[in-house]
Amino acid sequence: MTEGKEKRISGLLRENGIRATKGRVEVLELFLKAGRPLAQMQIMDMLGTKLDRASVYRILNAFAEAGIIHMAYVDGRHRVYELPDKCSGRNCHPHFSCRNCGMTACLEGFKISFKGALGKGFVAERQKVLIEGLCPNCRE
Amino acid sequence: MTEGKEKRISGLLRENGIRATKGRVEVLELFLKAGRPLAQMQIMDMLGTKLDRASVYRILNAFAEAGIIHMAYVDGRHRVYELPDKCSGRNCHPHFSCRNCGMTACLEGFKISFKGALGKGFVAERQKVLIEGLCPNCRE
DNA sequence: TCATTTATGCGACATTATTGCAATAACGAA
DNA sequence: TTCGTTATTGCAATAATGTCGCATAAATGA
């Protein structure tokens, strides 16, 4: 990582009111580079032994609390996080998950309205949409 | 449970190629009575000590494999199952989950088309839609 | 640089789910 | 109905994911 990039990411963290530690910069860098949703396990795999398991969980929680990332969806037992730049507060875009290789992707340009879906007295706050299937690579 | 009902449920199980054991009949009975998605914990609560935890997990897996139920969605750490009678293979109806009391409900009469959502080469097989919010009881 | 505050690493623990194995129950055939 | 085969159950042990407390280390502001 270049020095300039690290400074930019550190600034991003401080802007959001949390300290810019080495581990946090590395994790945020991963999210920025990936451009797709990530789960704790994938982050651990990419970082090797640079960070403790507990630290990764705490970093993800800190990021989510600060609004730097948010939980996109749950895949099996894995919580998958992403940068919120493509989502407004109530209306998160859908995600795709490949049932063969586990690859995930954000689906843009695809809005869902849930107007009229709920009965009387219900209040909708968030929607989570996950489409499962096969990605181009796994499609034999 | 009346004798007739038990026989009917046993038949349902055998039709689907699995043995009709006491535990399985009780669990399927719960799903039929509930008319809403259920998680393992709720089933344990309703059955008390009649069945072992491991057995409930195995029953849910056996049911899912046999197509008697399917996993509707994941709520926090809980996998929530339901009878598939309201879903066609590819197009599962959405669900609602109350963030306050955890109550869940199926949303019917609300179809989502994901045509055009995926890029070239992707194959969509299933969609999972979860709307989170407040139910009438927990509203304010 | 120093003092204060916050984050990290480590180990222990909590929760959810799965597995191996012996005992038991279900089912089909005689 | 009874018997033998095969699948299922209960129990205990184990795995996988996530959290917590605490001492140490690092980041920030003065």
Image (cartoon, coloured by chain):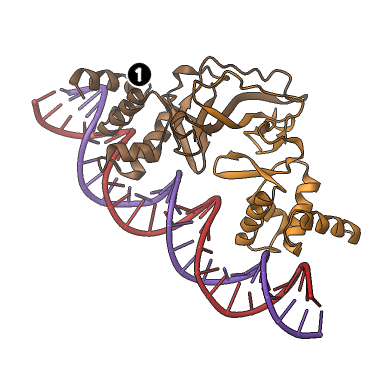
Chain colours: A orange, B brown, C purple, D red
Residue furthest out toward the top:
B109
Quadrant of residue B130 within the rendered picture: top right
- Quadrant assignment, res B6: top left
Tell me, yes or no, if residue A140 can be seen here.
no
Q: Residue C18 at x, y = what percent?
A: 45, 45
Q: Secondary structure at mark 1?
A: helix
Chain ID at mark 1:
B
The number of numbered badges drawn on the structure is 1
Question: Residue B47 in the image: x percent, y percent?
Answer: 28, 37
Could you tell whether B138 is left or right of A83 in the image?
left
Residue type pointed to by label 1? Glu
Q: Quadrant of residue B5?
A: top left
Residue at 65% in and 21% down: A113
Could you tell me if residue A29 is visible in this image?
yes
As rendered, which of B114 and A128 lies closer to the eye?
A128
The residue closer to the viewer here, A86 or D17, is A86
Say above or below: A54 vs A63. Answer: below
Q: State the image coordinates of residue B14 (x, y, percent, origin top left).
A: 32, 22
**Picture quarter with the N terminus of chain B:** top left
**Mark 1 sits on what residue?**
B15
Q: Badge 1, how many Cα within 10 Å: few under 14, some, many 20+? A: few
Q: Compared with residue A22, is residue B8 higher up or lower down, i.e. above or below? A: above
Q: Residue at x 83, y 57 (%)?
A: A11
Please state the horizontal and vertical placement of residue A41, each as a whole percent of the image.
63, 51
Residue B113 lies left or right of residue A120; in this view the side is right
